[in-house]
Image (cartoon, rainbow, N blue to C red):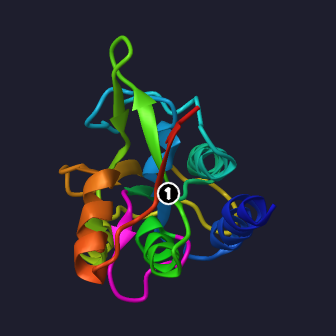
């Protein structure tokens, strides 16, 4: 439920404050590449389907995008969604794979590596488009610098305002098994891998 509180409830609270402001601010916020859900065509494009989430987290991020669109249309808020792709670097989130893989490898616990169905009986390990935090920051600043103005004030729309969506990634997906190989090399410990089919 924390995803729903933060990604939907918290985001709506922010949008409510922004729509009543005078003048209204332009808003740039973190969406997620997870909105692409069950799409198998890569690389992802901002125009690809986002109506088949594969997790509750993805569903809340997609809900945020839809709610943002409504606030843009109804209240004239200038909104930019940035779909981040697996951000890594200093001060990273502890629930990211590279952190918990490291912890579990060092503790001698098995790690789960997901596979997806390929053609026929062929299985491929899932890949992630790891994006360094400095590149994400540059993208955020660029989006802020180019954001158009909101057109409303005090909760009233005065005209159309920009609504933008951008993917923020490096377009070079890395198989998760390659990440595990690198961790094994750096940690000098062999990982106990459990390959699991992603549903």
Residue 27 in magenta?
no
Question: 30 above or below 54?
Answer: below
Q: Secondary structure at mark 1?
A: strand
Task: Name the foreground residue: 143 vs 89.
Answer: 89
* Residue 141: % across, % down: 29, 76
Question: Which residue appears at 33% of the width and 15% of the height?
Answer: 119
Question: Which residue appears at 43% of the width and 49% of the height?
Answer: 33
Query: In the picture, which quadrant includes the C terminus?
Result: top right
* Residue 146: % across, % down: 27, 65
Task: Name the foreground residue: 113 vs 170.
Answer: 113
Residue 89 in magenta?
yes
* Residue 17: % across, % down: 70, 73
Res 125 → quadrant: top left
Question: 40 above or below 138?
Answer: above
- The span picked out in magenta is 85-95
Query: In the picture, which quadrant includes the N terminus?
Result: bottom right
Residue sticking out furthest to the right: 1
Tell me the chief SS of the magenta region.
Answer: loop
């Amino acid at each position: 439920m924390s995803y729903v509180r933060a990604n939907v409830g918290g985001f709506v609270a922010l949008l409510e404050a922004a729509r009543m402001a005078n003048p209204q601010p332009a808003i740039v916020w973190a969406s997620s590449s997870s909105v692409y859900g069950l799409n198998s065509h890569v690389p992802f494009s901002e125009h690809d389907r986002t109506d088949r989430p594969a997790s509750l987290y993805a569903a809340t991020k997609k809900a945020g995008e839809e709610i943002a669109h409504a606030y843009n249309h109804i209240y004239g808020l200038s909104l930019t969604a940035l779909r981040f792709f697996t951000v890594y670097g200093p001060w990273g989130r502890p629930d990211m794979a590279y952190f918990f893989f490291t912890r579990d490898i060092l503790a001698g616990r098995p790690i789960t590596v997901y596979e997806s169905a390929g053609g026929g009986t062929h299985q491929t390990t899932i890949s992630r488009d790891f994006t360094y935090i400095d590149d994400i920051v540059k993208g955020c600043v660029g989006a802020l610098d180019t954001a158009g103005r909101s057109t409303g004030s005090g909760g009233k729309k005065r005209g159309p305002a920009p609504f933008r969506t951008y993917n923020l990634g490096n377009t070079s997906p890395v198989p998760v098994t390659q990440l595990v190989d690198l961790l094994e090399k750096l940690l000098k410990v062999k990982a106990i891998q459990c390959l699991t089919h992603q549903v």
